[in-house]
Structures are given as C-alpha cells and as structure tokens.
Amino acid sequence: MHLNAIVESLLFATQEPLPLTQMVTAVKDTAKDIRDATPEGETVPEWIEPLLTVDELSLRVAIDELVAHYEADGRAFTIVERSHGWRLCAKVDYVEWCRALYPGKKVQRLSQPALETLAIIAYRQPITKAGVEAVRGVSVDAMVQQLVDRGLVKIEGRADLPGRPLLYGTTDAFLDHFAVRTLDELPNASELRRVKLPTPDSEQPGAAAPEETQLSLAPAASE
C-alpha cells in the first residue's frame, strides 16, 4: 500500500478541498485501526508502520510526486491547492469540454464596473461602500449587491466610524475563481495595498454620524 496511492484515493473520494491535517488523520488513524485489528499471532503488514508516522511534509512530497506523474503521462487533470486544502481538478485546457456537462449553467461574466469594484474590495478589504465609491467616483450599490449575490463578496462586519457602515471583503469562492490560495498571491498585492486612495468625507476624522429618521413609539396626541 503506497502513500501516493492513498493520497490519490482520498482526493478522488471528495469534491471539497482536503486539508493536509485531515489527510494525515485519515492515513494514521486507518493504519492504526488495521494494526490493532490484526489477530494476535499474525504479522502486521510491513507497509503499516511507515503510515503510522505520516506527517504533512510527507504528504506534500506525495502530492508533488503525483503531480509530476500526471504531467509525465499527459493526464487531463492535476492536483491544485486552494484556500482550504487540495483537490483534483481538470486542467484549464479542458474547461470547455467539462462545461458541456452543465448546459444549463451559462458562464456569467462580470462587467467592467463590477470588476473594478471587486478589485478595490479585494486589495483594500475590509472596506466600506463609501470607501469604494471614493475611489471609483460613482455609486457602487448595484455593483456590490451583484458581487454579494454571486458569492464573491461578503459582509465582514461594521466599521468603527460614524454611522457604523458595513465592511466588505472577498470570499473563499473569490479565491477559487481566481485560482489563488491567499490574497497575497494577487498580482502586485503588496504594492497596491500601499497606494494612497481617496477617503470619503464620511470617514474623515471628526465626521459626524449621518442623521437617521427615528420613528416615535409614543401614542399620538388626541385632538
């Protein structure tokens, strides 16, 4: 029983990214169960002992060897690392054929305004809607809602600013869509995060909280 084959079977058996920690647990626990279930007097298979000491480093080596094997054989799939683990994926060269399996799911491309809004959020998150509008110079209500609906952007909380505006950031689906493990892998991430951006008036020091209309709970006075 070779470790590479075990790793391949684990990745094949799940449709979700599989973390190294979970693979380590699966390998070691199964090897221990096999060892403990061996009847007394019988010899434990010799391949069990190495599996009892598997760690994340040995799994990474196994994954690298599998990827090299797939490349050498010209396979249409490979193993990729995503934000939450590793998974088997078809190569980009075959995406059109794979898409044919799902004719009802048309590719929905983002508009240029939506892409610009998404880029600002991705590089400067968490950021308020007013912060994005200060950079783009136009209202982004519709664009932000579209990105939230597409699962690329989510609400991260509220800013410690007057009015407590919502903060927005990207999702794991965003990382998967753009094939990066972390935000640091975005092009020119460190440089673009240092660029000075316009600040909305509502987020300037000393800005007053926006006035809100309050509904009275007192009974109306009789005439």
Image (spheres, rainbow, N blue to C red):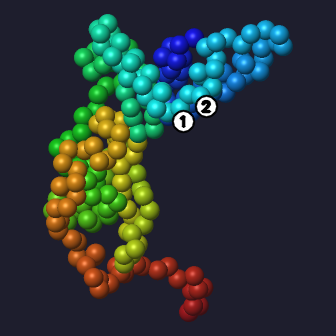
Query: Label for residue 166?
Result: none
Q: Are marks 2 and 1 in contact (CB under 8 Å)?
A: yes
Residue 75, compared with residue 190, is above or below; it is above
Q: Amino acid at mark 1?
A: Thr
Query: 196 or 168, which lies in front?
Result: 196
In the image, is 120 to the left or to the right of 170?
left
Quadrant assignment, res 219? bottom right
Q: Residues within 10 Å of mark 1 (few under 14, many from 20)?
A: few
Residue 109, compared with residue 123, is above or below; it is above
Quadrant assignment, res 125? bottom left
Disc 1 designates what residue? 21
Q: Amino acid at mark 2?
A: Thr
Look at the image and tell me in which quarter the C terminus lies.
bottom right
Q: Residue at x 57, y 82 (%)?
A: 217
In the image, is 38 to the left or to the right of 221?
right
In the rendered image, residue 86, in percent from the top left (x then y), is placed at: 44, 29
Query: 79 or 205, which lies in front?
Result: 79
In the rendered image, residue 191, in percent from the top left (x then y), is placed at: 17, 55
Query: Label for residue 25?
Result: 2
- Indicate the secondary structure of the residue bearing disc 2: helix
Q: Residues within 10 Å of mark 2 (few under 14, many from 20)?
A: some
Q: Residue at x 84, y 13 (%)?
A: 40
In the rendered image, residue 112, in percent from the top left (x then y), is placed at: 17, 44
Quadrant assignment, res 23? top right
